[in-house]
């Protein structure tokens, strides 16, 4: 049965997360379905950042490193992220970008498995993961990056594999990998496993310690709502912290950064994976985004994510049937993340036409229309309205105009 607007509103009325929407500064007249690329602005963030600028930086100046604990912010915010990924507080720190953290952990894993020369990853993984892996391999004699299909990873990991680099929820298809099974398979062959959680954290269940995971990274600007270019985070299981060493031995990773000695001595624990001076303004914004989750039931979050994505699939397949859309994400809600992709040969102009009508999703080459559903602020009525507008855009041919075919710099 085709879902109705009344059905969507009834779901919103019963939604335990419904009140969370008011905590975000969402523009009127916009259906925002791109929180999997850039999370919406938490309403509390502007005042928090303004206070850090005017009161801490402006009034207390450099004394804020002590007075306002700027020096502890990276560990503090990391500890607040830890429950969202099934980690202990002392196993997570906020530092640098996802790409830089990938480099640090891939290089550290390679050094921890001497004699093994292969970095194994999924073909079609998020490009920066593959590019960084290739960069690490190019610096090590005889090292190589090997790619395999996701379903073949467990079978091809071997005695030459030092580290397996996988994304938990695929950026394009939304497919969610079996973290526990793949971690076991890699570790049985003696390899370490590094999970990219950028499209997972804050939207789907993640249980790093329950799965016996070794390493992980993730970004702060998607479901964590930390703002554009927000600092990233990394996880190193406690059992590895004393033996792994970051290749970027910056002063914030030193055991005594303000001793100013010439010799590098890595800090104990997770702090050794910090590098340069942290972005205090970025950390302040990220902390507000992470704080949104602290009075939210994760079971409610996951249930809503699955219901929102299921509703979108119904809307597209029932109300835009016959217009060439093919589901490119898993149909099983337990096997997908919180975004849904449909393939269409004209996905790019369709995406542009939707944006012009106030429905913001995104396009991924070569032919994917991708919509993200953030349980904290996406409503069921949002999804229904987006489906209604898509149906109209397709029925009227509104997407088929030259201005929608011109590629913007960011798609």
Image: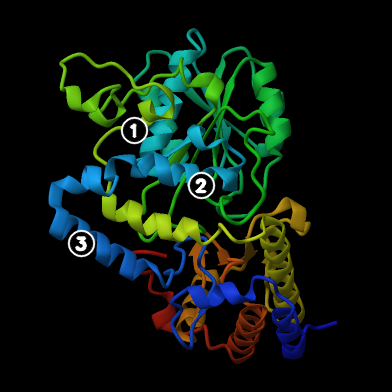
Q: Nearer the N terminus, badge 2 or badge 1?
A: 2
Q: Position of residue 176 (x, y in %)?
A: 67, 48
Q: Is residue 56 above or below residue 96?
A: below
- Which image quadrant: the C terminus? bottom left
Estimate the spatial distance between the alpha carbons at disc 2 and disc 1, rounded to whole Å: 16 Å
- Which image quadrant: the N terminus? bottom right
Res 15 quadrant in image? bottom right
| Closer to the camera in the image, 271 or 122 | 271
Query: Taking the image as drawn, is residue 237 in sight?
Result: yes
Q: Secondary structure at mark 3?
A: helix
At 66% from the left and 40% from the top, the residue drawn is 207
The residue at which mark 2 appears reads as: 81
Dot 2 and dot 3 residues touching (CB under 8 Å): no
Q: Residues within 10 Å of mark 3 (few under 14, many from 20)?
A: few
Q: Secondary structure at mark 1?
A: loop
The residue at which mark 1 appears reads as: 274
| Closer to the camera in the image, 70 or 39 | 70
Instruction: Give the colour scheme shown.
Output: rainbow
Query: Taking the image as drawn, is residue 378 in sight?
Result: no
Depth check, mark 1 against mark 3: the one in front is 3
Res 66 quadrant in image? top left
Q: Which mark is residue 109?
A: none
At 58% from the left and 50% from the top, the residue drawn is 200
Q: Nearer the N terminus, badge 2 or badge 3?
A: 3
At 55% from the left and 70% from the top, the residue drawn is 347
Q: Position of residue 394 (x, y in %)?
A: 62, 84
The residue at which mark 3 appears reads as: 55
| Closer to the camera in the image, 1 or 208 | 208
Q: Nearer the N terminus, badge 1 or badge 3?
A: 3
Q: Position of residue 127 (x, y in %)?
A: 46, 44
């Amino acid at each position: 049965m085709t879902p109705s607007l009344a059905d969507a509103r009834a779901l919103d009325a019963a939604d335990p997360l419904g009140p969370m929407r008011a905590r975000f500064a969402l523009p009127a007249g916009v259906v925002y379905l791109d929180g999997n690329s850039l999370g919406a602005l938490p309403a509390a963030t502007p005042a928090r950042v303004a206070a850090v600028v005017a009161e801490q930086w402006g009034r207390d100046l450099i004394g804020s490193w002590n007075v306002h604990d700027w020096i502890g912010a990276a560990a503090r915010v990391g500890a607040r992220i830890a429950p969202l990924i099934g980690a202990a507080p002392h196993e997570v720190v906020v530092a640098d970008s996802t790409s830089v953290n990938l480099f640090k952990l891939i290089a550290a894993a390679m050094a921890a498995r001497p004699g093994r020369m292969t970095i194994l990853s999924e073909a079609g993984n998020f490009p920066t993961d593959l590019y960084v892996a290739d960069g690490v391999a190019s610096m090590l004699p005889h090292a190589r990056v090997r790619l395999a299909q996701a379903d073949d990873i467990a079978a091809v990991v071997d005695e030459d594999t030092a580290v397996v680099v996988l994304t938990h929820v695929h950026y394009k298809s939304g497919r969610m990998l079996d973290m526990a099974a793949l971690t076991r398979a890699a570790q049985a062959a003696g390899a370490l496993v590094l999970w990219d959680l950028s499209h997972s954290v804050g939207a789907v269940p993640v249980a790093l310690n329950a799965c016996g995971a070794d390493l992980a990274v993730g970004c702060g600007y998607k479901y964590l709502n930390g703002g554009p270019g927000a600092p990233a985070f990394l996880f190193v299981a406690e059992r590895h912290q004393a033996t792994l060493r970051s290749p970027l031995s910056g002063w914030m990773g030193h055991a005594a950064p303000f001793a100013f000695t010439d010799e590098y001595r890595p800090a104990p624990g997770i702090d050794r994976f910090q590098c340069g001076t942290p972005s205090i303004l970025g950390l302040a914004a990220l902390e507000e985004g992470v704080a949104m989750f602290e009075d939210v039931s994760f079971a409610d979050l996951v249930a809503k994510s699955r219901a929102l994505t299921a509703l979108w699939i119904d809307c597209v397949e029932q109300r835009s049937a016959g217009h060439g859309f093919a589901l490119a994400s898993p149909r099983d809600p337990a096997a997908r993340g919180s975004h849904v992709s449909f393939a269409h040969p004209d996905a790019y102009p369709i995406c542009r036409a939707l944006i012009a009508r106030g429905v913001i999703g995104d396009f991924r080459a070569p032919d994917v229309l991708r919509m993200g559903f953030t349980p904290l602020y996406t409503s069921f009525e949002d999804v229904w309205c987006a489906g209604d507008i898509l149906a109209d855009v397709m029925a009227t041919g509104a997407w088929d105009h030259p201005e929608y075919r011109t590629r913007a710099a960011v798609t």
